[in-house]
Image (cartoon, rainbow, N blue to C red):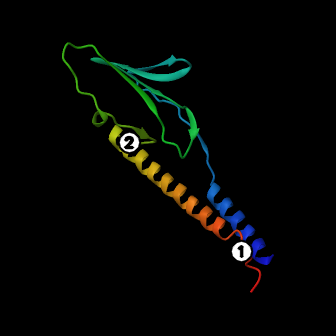
Amino acid sequence: MRYSTLSLFLTGCCFQFMQGCATMVVMVPQPSPDQEIVYVKGAEHIVSQKSNILSVGLCNRVRDSSVKPEFLISLSNKTDKPINFSTENITAKVNGDDLKVYTYEELERIARQQYALMMFCVGLSGAARSLNATNAGSNSDQC
């Protein structure tokens, strides 16, 4: 009886530590003097019209602080020449600090790593259930 009470207490403590505190973050775009804000389906987009038209909008204005922000970037080429546009051409700042701009390959690698970790945890859970099922018929209280 004492062992199960201690086990239950430790399990409860572990759940408390694993929950963590998530704060909600509201992101508001700050346009430069030569940019304007337009609304697309209620979402703010910053539009810059120079030699090309560039629009940057938030996919989720209010988000959990642990979630990476997502942006929708649209580019319209107004010149006759082709342009190369990639993540190397994008910079992002928050309060003057540079942010990491992920490439598709980096996001794909992160997703594969998270998937592999999840599959490892599922396998570990299956092994633990198998061990519990093996010991289900034995009575450990008797010596």
| Helix, strand or loop under label 2 | helix
Residue 107 or 58: which is nearer the viewer? 107
Q: Position of residue 15 (x, y in %)?
A: 67, 60
Q: Residue at x 61, y 48 (%)?
A: 22
Q: Quadrant of residue 65?
A: top right
What is the residue that sits farthest to the right in this orientation? Answer: 1
Q: Position of residue 138 (x, y in %)?
A: 71, 74
Residue 119 or 82: which is nearer the viewer? 119
What is the residue that sits farthest to the front in this orientation? Answer: 137
| Helix, strand or loop under label 1 | loop
Is the C terminus in the top left, top right, bottom left or bottom right quadrant? bottom right
Q: Which residue is mark 1?
A: 138
Q: What separation in Å lies between label 1 and label 2 (alpha carbons)? A: 46 Å
> Foreground mark, 1 or 2?
1
Q: Amino acid at mark 1?
A: Ser
In this rendering, is residue 119 above or below 68? below
Q: Amino acid at mark 2?
A: Glu
Q: How many residues crowd around disc 2 within 10 Å: few (fewer than 14), some, or many (20 or more)?
A: few
Q: Position of residue 142 (x, y in %)?
A: 77, 83
In this rendering, is residue 140 above or below 21? below
Whether residue 66 sits left or right of residue 31 in the image: it is right
Mark 1 and mark 2 lie on one chain; the one further toward the N terminus is 2
Is the N terminus in the top left, top right, bottom left or bottom right quadrant? bottom right
Q: Residue at x 51, y 17 (%)?
A: 40
Q: Position of residue 67 (x, y in %)?
A: 52, 43
Q: Quadrant of residue 2?
A: bottom right
Which circle marks residue 108 in the picture? Answer: 2
